[in-house]
Image: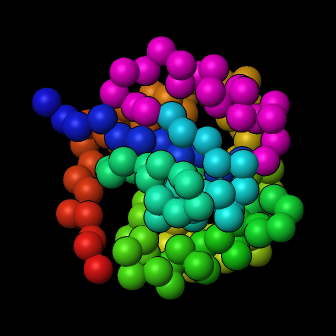
Amino acid sequence: MTKPINILLVEDDEIDIEAVARAFRHETRLNFVVANSGTEALSSLRGEAGCEPVPYPYVILLDLNMPQMNGFEFLEILRSDPKLRETVVFVLTTSDRDEDRITAFEYCVAGYFLKPRINASYSNLVTFFNSYQQMAEFPPQRIV
């Protein structure tokens, strides 16, 4: 039996959070966690600032357009952290800009999802992650 994975949604928009949460609410093999900012996500991943660490294995769904720390700033910090640099990250954004896609893949994201294409059917995202969870192998968790 495959181990459940944790989906960490890094998103500041309450409507998007609710839509994604609704799609994941009946899942038993996918645990859903929300961080409202890049700073909160890093604290959750590291188990800092009174946050419970997100259990491994986990995958991040990352919005790019957030205040304080945007998605690219988050990725830069994540990729420079020896314990977190191999984290699987999928971008979930409204940005259809070529420059953003190029930059995201330069930070080694595993995929780039456009909210307008998924919008009404976040259930497709759940189907994707169910398949991903069943087929993907995760590296052992680094202890540095």
User: Would you say residue 17 sits in the magenta stretch?
Assistant: yes
Residue 83 is left or right of residue 67, and the answer is: left
In the current view of this chain or complex, which residue is farthest to the top? Answer: 26
Residue 129 against residue 61 in the figure, above or below? above
Residue 29 is left or right of residue 44, and the answer is: left
Looking at the image, can residue 105 be seen? yes
Q: Residue at x 26, y 73 (%)?
A: 143
Q: Residue at x 68, y 62 (%)?
A: 38
Quarter of the image for residue 117 reads top right
Q: Position of residue 116 (x, y in %)?
A: 78, 39
Q: Nearer the viewer, residue 121 or 67?
A: 67
Q: Residue at x 47, y 64 (%)?
A: 46
Looking at the image, can residue 91 be seen? no
User: Would you say residue 110 sits in the magenta stretch?
Assistant: no
Q: Nearer the viewer, residue 104 or 81?
A: 81
In the current view of this chain or complex, which residue is farthest to the front? Answer: 50
Q: Position of residue 113 (x, y in %)?
A: 63, 49
For the magenta stretch, what is the residue range? 12-31
Q: Nearer the viewer, residue 81 or 49?
A: 49
